[in-house]
Amino acid sequence: MAFMLYTDKKMRNPANTRLIFNGVGNLDVVLYFGSSQSDEVLSPETDAQIILKPVNLIKKWQPNKYYDYGNIIEPSNPNGYIYQCITPGRTGSEEPRWWVDYISGVSGSAWFKVLGEAFRHTDIKISLTQAGLDSAVGGEGIELGDQLQGGRAIPIYMRVVNKSYSLRNDFTDACRGLATNSTITTTTDIYAD
């Protein structure tokens, strides 16, 4: 099992957290980063530190592409809103006109509706302590060390800020996530005396 985010300190439940908002507010979550395998070691590939940071996962609209129900996209020239496929199908060669009302765009046989304002990476703050969230900068990464040994979970405190009054979520297709810089996982020999 590789280093990843978990929902529990014992690293038994991989995190698959989705964002759901019903209006303006904050969502505070504690996740745990690590590997349940005590013989694994994580090191940065080129940087001096292992860095965990918010990343953009949203995909841009593409011509002649099949979209499933629930896929979330943004226009190829982002307008600040995200759209969800409500009728699966293949897009045409022309990008639809992206409205900001209920039924937004039709391209080929695929239909999309507006979900609301796009989540931004600056909407996500992370810290190694709960108290650190108050001074954390949205969108910035945190240093986890120059080497991590498996078998120990590092608590990662995350605050997602919703500045929009719209009901919005990325439940069917993640728009934002957390990722490390380029790393290498190795295994060590552990011998008992």
Image (cartoon, rainbow, N blue to C red):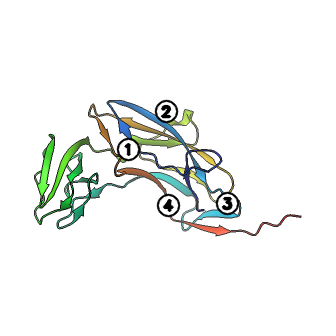
For the residue pair 190 and 113, the one nearer the viewer reads as 113
Instruction: Residue 134: give its label.
Output: 2
Q: Secondary structure at mark 2?
A: helix
Asked if the residue under mark 2 is in contact with the one under mark 1, i.e. CB atoms within 8 Å, the reply is no
If you read the primary sequence from the N terminus, does the residue marked by circle 1 or circle 2 appear first?
1
Tell whether 162 sits left or right of 82.
Answer: right
Identify which amino acid the numbered label 3 is placed on.
Gln
Q: Residues within 10 Å of mark 1 (few under 14, many from 20)?
A: some
Asked if the residue under mark 4 is in contact with the one under mark 1, i.e. CB atoms within 8 Å, the reply is no
Q: Residues within 10 Å of mark 4 (few under 14, many from 20)?
A: some
For the residue pair 132 and 190, the one nearer the viewer reads as 190
If you read the primary sequence from the N terminus, does the residue marked by circle 1 or circle 4 appear first?
1
Report x, y in % for residue 18: 41, 45
Q: CA distance from mark 3 to mark 2?
A: 33 Å
Q: Quadrant of the C terminus?
A: bottom right
Q: Residues within 10 Å of mark 3 (few under 14, many from 20)?
A: some
Instruction: Residue 122: give its label.
Output: 1
For the residue pair 52 and 190, the one nearer the viewer reads as 190
Identify which amino acid the numbered label 4 is placed on.
Asn
Name which residue lies at 56% across and 35% down.
130
**Mark 4 or mark 3, which is nearer to you?**
3
